[in-house]
Amino acid sequence: MREISADTITQSVARLCQEANFFLGEDVLDALRQAREAEESPLGQEVLNQLLENADIAAREHFPLCQDCGTTVVFLEAGQDVHVIGGSLYAAVDEGVRQGYAQGYLRKSIVRQPFSARVNTQDNTPPVIHTEIVPGDRLKIVVLPKGGGSENMTRLAMLKPAEGRDGVIQSVVRAVAEAGSNPCPPIIVGVGIGGTADKAMVLAKKALLRKVGEPNPEPEFAELERDLLSRVNALGIGPAGFGGRTTALAVHIEVFPTHIASLPVAVNLQCHSARHKEALL
Amino acid sequence: MRSDYIPITSPLDEETVARLRAGDRVSITGVLYTARDASHRRITAALDRGEKAPFDFAGHTLYYMGPSPAHPGQVIGSAGPTTSGRMDAYTPRLIAAGLRAMIGKGSRSREVKEAIKKYKAVYLAATGGAGALIARSIKKAEVIAYEDLGTEAIVRLEVEDFPAIVVNDIYGGDLYEEGKARYQA
């Protein structure tokens, strides 16, 4: 049994919230640079230039990349031999969000109740936390601030198994086409296939954590990712939706076994401000 | 400022609006008012009660934006556009009452596009997710209404060379449709 203090968790989460909002990952920056070289649309090239300049300013000045500093989505992988001392795990994460968003001058975007009392909680809590228990004695924390504009374009399709691979392609391409300019393209398309509706959706979100453009290790799924990327980029939506070849930087698929009656397909879109940072305690 | 940008002043006059075409790049100097979901709701509720809006928006430009907090000594935090479509339910009425220009991101409803044509307004897009860059063109920011809404309060902004692109013009032009059609494979 290894002990980790609640304070240590709070400090890590506070730091990750800020780093994620200030520093765009090298993988995302590389993908944006490559897109700028390949993009044919002059407006599209200009948007990509603006995004790279924006990332540069944010990193240099510790300034939020985007005014939407997101719902704080936190993925925890807790080793079963970890013992949290000095407070509860989730309270420690909440406190980290509270401190991180205050210290970093990040926007607080969470309302207490979604439909009749939309009052801001003022500290961006509560975060959305996904926890997995894994072997070992370490605690991995991943913070993904998720913007509302892209999250609102999420789709779930419960396909008939007979619809198969073509049905999956149609569902994903339709989701991106309908989203159009709203989710701040160029986007990363997270796709969860299989499981139940809820499982597929968590897979789609987790798919966004993969290094941009790194293929699924299973060749069949990697091929589907390539097919989907070329179909999505044939839509012509382009950077900021002004028309162009770069609608998505990558399509990431995660797959899970499913029921004999089911073929769930969840699509979770990530704007180009693909922010996430992690720590291993 | 790049030479292919059309410099315009906000509030926009009718001649300027008539000159703008979908796809034009503009560089805006002057005054913008921020408004997002919650403030739109309050403005229209006030109009429903026969009261005045907290500022006279006739002839003015709304910027759909809720900033991150300003660092000490700075004017504003990150300040890029939010998705305009969420304001569509409120917008035709505001355009009919004189609203001249809107800045946001993402496509508008058929009703909004029709109101833009009918009442000679214009919809512009700023680059979504470029909030740190856009903040540099904001020189002054002052909360003028609904302070309790925090980031959703109405803020009067003074901007210089604020970069935007015309999406919907008075002639029915739509950059999102035209741009997509041009690059569809």
Image: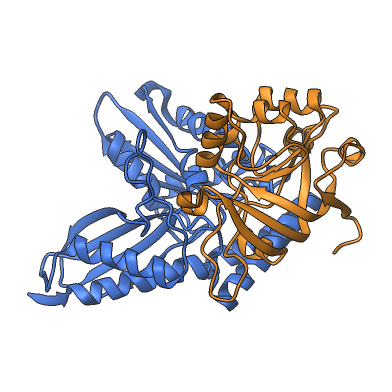
Picture quadrant where residue A280 is located: bottom left
Q: Give percent across and percent down for residue B137.
A: 72, 63
| Colour scheme | by chain
Comparing A173 with A271, the one in front is A271
Q: In which quarter of the image is the N terminus of chain B?
A: bottom right
Q: Which residue is drawn at 48% across and 46% down?
A: A148
Q: Give percent across and percent down for residue B19.
A: 92, 39
Q: Give percent across and percent down for residue B102.
A: 71, 41
Q: Residue at x 32, y 69 (%)?
A: A13
Image-based side of A14 in relation to A225, left or right: left
Q: Which chain is blue?
A: A
Q: Give percent across and percent down for residue B115.
A: 73, 25
Image-based side of B10 in relation to B40, left or right: right
**How many labels, in total?**
0
Q: Does residue A33 show up?
A: no
Q: Quadrant of the C terminus of chain B?
A: top right
Whether A147 is drawn above or below B167: the answer is below
Comparing A48 with A149, the one in front is A149
Image-based side of B23 in relation to A99, left or right: right
In the rendering, what colour is chain B? orange
Which residue is most to the left?
A1
Comparing A277 with A123, the one in front is A123
